[in-house]
Image (tube, grey):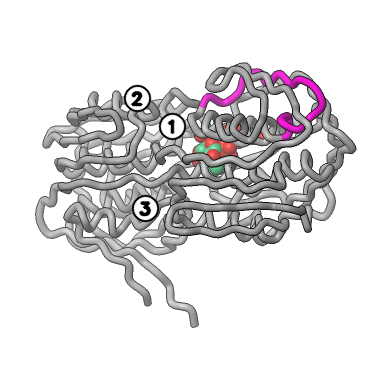
Amino acid sequence: MEKVEKIRIYRNKSQPLKGKVKISGAKNAVLPAIAASLLTKEKIKLTNIPLVKDVFTILTLMKELGADYGLKRNSLSIQTKNITSDEASYELVSAMRASILVLGPLLARSGKAAVALPGGCAIGSRPIDLHIHALEKLGATISLEHGYIKAEAEELRGTEIEFEKKTVGGTENSLMAASLAQGETVLKNCALEPEVSNLCQLLVKMGAKIDGIGRETIRVRGVEELGGATHEIIPDRIEAGTFLVAGALSNGDIQLTNVNPQHLETVIERLRYSGAKIEVKNKSLRVVGSPKIKSQDITTSPYPGFPTDMQAQFIVLMTQASGTSIITETIFDRRFSHVNELLRLGANIEVRGDKAIVRGKTPLSGAEIIATDLRASASLILAGLIASGETIINEVEHLDRGYEKIEEKLSSLGACIERIKE
Ligand code: UD1
């Protein structure tokens, strides 16, 4: 029988985390970049690749679609001379929702695509209607058959697409499809996340004609063909944010390298408000925690607002703040699965609709808990770092989807954390 992996964290006295940690490339930037490689016959080289499970999942999918790749340390070379299948299977899409990102490129390159309706993180309803609507506007015919989204188009034609609401994946799928469409596409109300800009920069290197990168309105003039390129993936701002919270929470002193501080402005602002000191350098950040943490209200919103992917980690920080904090989640429904687990550790949190009311300061005491989704898992690790005694986190596969060697990185900062197999 396959052994179950768990994470064990142990703490018997105050343990400030100290030292230096290198942040990996951004999971959410590498997935669309790999999908974009389907748009050309030529080779795409990507550097600063994070070695996380979602990357291996999309690479398995790429192989099924006809790609050849080589991964050496953190550099990937990938080439799809011919598309040999236009189907993304349920098995892969249910393991990782971002598999939907191959829909636009497959359709643009080969005129058809079939992608299973996604699963992925268990965080409320996550529809793909905005992706579908955009591709239909570009001229695709889309149907749902046997659990698969089937898209077909003899040719895609430039058009105007205004997203009803900001969608990272929807913007990315549309940008990739529009790059090979006939004529000009104007995309309005685009997501402003740095991962979207990172994709645009790769597409431009491949020969795409894109104006307005980093803005809400982006113009794409379609070209006949795209070519090879070499591109660096931006640092993972959510991994960086998670380590910043670890430093603030443990009253530690951590230096993060390989970061882009500009991508973390809102998170830095909130951490400073909580009492932590943050030193900003060109590509590094230093966090020095404070023994007194201040409560605050936070509302998640699209970039440059406070990221939903940092909400769970900040809830843990607020359990150690004196006073009441109200955390409002506006991006995803039911994204509070970590709260029940935090209650088991002794936190005082009440969920009311889209709000979590955190009453601090409460000491946490270690217990056996379950990781429920990717960012929830990170928050449970943070809680385990300050909980007294032993915390065992089950179902850590969620964590492995997006964090590279997190237990090694935390151990190097002085945490007592290990992976156990039972
Ligand atoms: C991406 C990130 C994820 C992050 C999220 C929000 C990747 C691989 N994942 O997810 O880590 O939490 O952005 O910052 O980059 N929506 C619709 N219809 C659609 C698409 C989205 O209603 O067709 C809604 C979603 O339910 C959600 C909101 O739009 O309420 C934002 O979702 P979106 O930005 O698309 O998230 P993802 O791209 O899936």
Could you tell which of marks 3 and 2 lies nearer the N-terminus? 2
Q: Mark 3 highlights which residue?
A: 341
Residue occupied by mark 1: 307
Is disc 1 placed on a helix, strand or loop? loop
Q: For ligand 1, tell me if the residue under mark 2 lies within 8 Å.
A: no
Percent position of residue 44, x then y: 59, 46
Question: Dividing the picture into quarters, in which one does residue 280 lie?
Answer: top left
Residue in the picture at 53% in, 22% down = 214
Residue 201 occupies quadrant: top right
In space, the residues marked 3 and 1 are separated at their CA atoms by: 21 Å
Q: Earlier in the sequence, mark 1 or mark 2?
A: 2
Q: Tag 2, which secondary structure?
A: helix
Q: Amino acid at mark 1?
A: Pro
Observer-nearest residue: 246 or 66? 66
Viewer-nearest of labels 1 and 2? 2
Mark on residue 200?
A: none
Neighbourhood count class around disc 2 (C-alpha, 10 Å): few under 14, some 14–19, many 20 upward: some
